[in-house]
Amino acid sequence: MSKIPFVSKEKVEEIASVYPTPFHLYDESGIRKNVENLKKAFSWNKGYKEYFAVKATPNPFLIKILQEYGCGCDCSSAPELMISKAIGAVGDDIMFSSNDTPLEEFKMCNDLGGIINLDDITHIEAVEKACGKLPKKMSCRYNPGGVFKITNDIMDNPGDAKYGMTTEQIYEAFAIMKEKGVEEFGIHSFLCSNTVTNEYYPMLAKILFELAADLKKKLGVHITFINLSGGIGIPYRPDQEPNDIFVIGEGVRKAYEETLIPAGMDDVSIYTELGRYMMGPYGALITKAINEKHTHKEYIGVDACAANLMRPAIYGAYHHITVLGKENEPCDKKYDVTGSLCENCDKFAVDRMLPEIDMGDYLFIHDAGAHGFSMGYNYNGKLRSSEILLKEDGSFQLIRRAETAEDYFATFDCFDFYNDLIK
Ligand SMILES: *Cc1c(COP(=O)(O)O)cnc(C)c1O
């Protein structure tokens, strides 16, 4: 099995003649088809809403595409709130799922009318302090602890995660919040990341629906939404079976009908905060082979590095690579594909079987559309690349320019030697 790039070699050559590599390229038509399907899969729920996890791909041009489909923004920092505000996503279009939150950020979210999702019980007081009083609509983040298993596989370890409140705390928090005038409640939980199984959301939904029904029964609180957060994954490897969002949507519907409807809670909205699933496959890092090296191994050096896409370096994550124009050639050469950082972990691929690579070939590094550009950094004085949108009609648009040395040195601009640096 293979993964098919969403762009041809000819198109990349055309783009690269205007905007030099490396760059992150995004596929408008893929983004649109995917969000349309997501909405269909949850159309059984009247209040369904996706809050795109801004941290995954914080580019206003891309988030605006999702906004056309009614998506809001899931934020957890002041600049992320500023992006939301800039594109007109305010009020109920903001979900603020932050943690370890400074008071100013609670205030900023509240001033924009966003929904504050409390990570900890002590933050009830923090929000009162920051905002004067508690907003009428609030949410709490739940962490049941233990390990999260699907059949016999351990998926993740919530008991080891810094997020959310314990079962005891969430009952206490809801009671306090109700007493302090909160009228509409939500529950949020994020137990596993990048799940490539159709069972994660339905299982999480069941846990949260049962908790919601019991909170309502014991405390008489009005729960109006349940936020399944992020965690639906993508198949980074070509042999992985992708999630079927329609099976996932039906699984959540079944849990809803089994648990919430009998509890008289048929008006509860389902929210999601997907990041990776919304953008991951629809972005690629495009980079050019600029060096080859034959020592103890065969190396191909490219013009991007881990500063442009960090996942392989920090998680050992697999990102599939297609050599553009050589899609049908045999993968009979074994390479390490490296970036230029002075760190040996700066390898996009290790011992990867690829077609023979010539200098100047363009490599399409798949699934870089989420947690790709956004995790970028400046180590070794490496500059962040541009971002380009490949539109439905085949034209392309610069949606973020490449960083320059001036940008890199900008925080020295209050010092005398700044001008010598950029000259
Ligand atoms: C990171 C994050 C998400 C998105 O996660 P994905 O794995 O990209 O779907 C959603 N909600 C919160 C609170 C997050 O921290």
Image (spheres, rainbow, N blue to C red):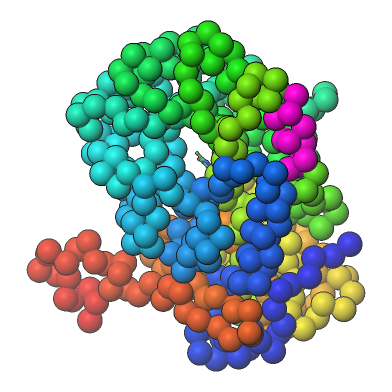
| Quadrant of the image containing the N terminus | bottom right
Give the residue at x 66% y 72%.
Answer: 29
For residue 375, above or below residue 247:
below
Q: Main secondary structure of the magenta part?
A: helix
What is the residue that sits farthest to the left in this orientation?
Answer: 416
Give the residue at x 55% y 75%.
Answer: 389
Q: Give the number of callouts.
A: 0
Give the residue at x 57% y 56%.
Answer: 370
Q: Nearer the viewer, residue 332 or 92?
A: 92
Is 298 placed left or right of 90 in the picture?
right
The location of residue 27, given as percent across then percent down, is: 63, 71
Is 98 placed left or right of 278 in the picture?
left
For residue 293, above or below residue 220:
below
Residue 255 inside the magenta-drawn segment:
yes
For residue 395, above or below residue 154:
below
Give the residue at x 53% y 33%.
Answer: 225
Residue 385 in view in this figure? no
Residue 68 inside the magenta-drawn segment:
no
Q: Nearer the viewer, residue 141 or 249?
A: 249
If the picture is divided into quarters, which one holds ligand 1? top right
Image quadrant where residue 300 sits: bottom right
For residue 362, above or below residue 345:
below
Q: Nearer the viewer, residue 205 or 145?
A: 205
The location of residue 89, given as percent across then percent down, is: 40, 55
The location of residue 374, given as percent across then percent down, is: 48, 57
Please state the extent of the stretch shown in magenta in the rendering.
Answer: 248-258
Is 302 placed left or right of 385 in the picture?
right
The location of residue 348, given as percent across then percent down, is: 65, 61
Is 217 placed left or right of 256 in the picture?
left
Image quadrant where residue 216 sits: top right
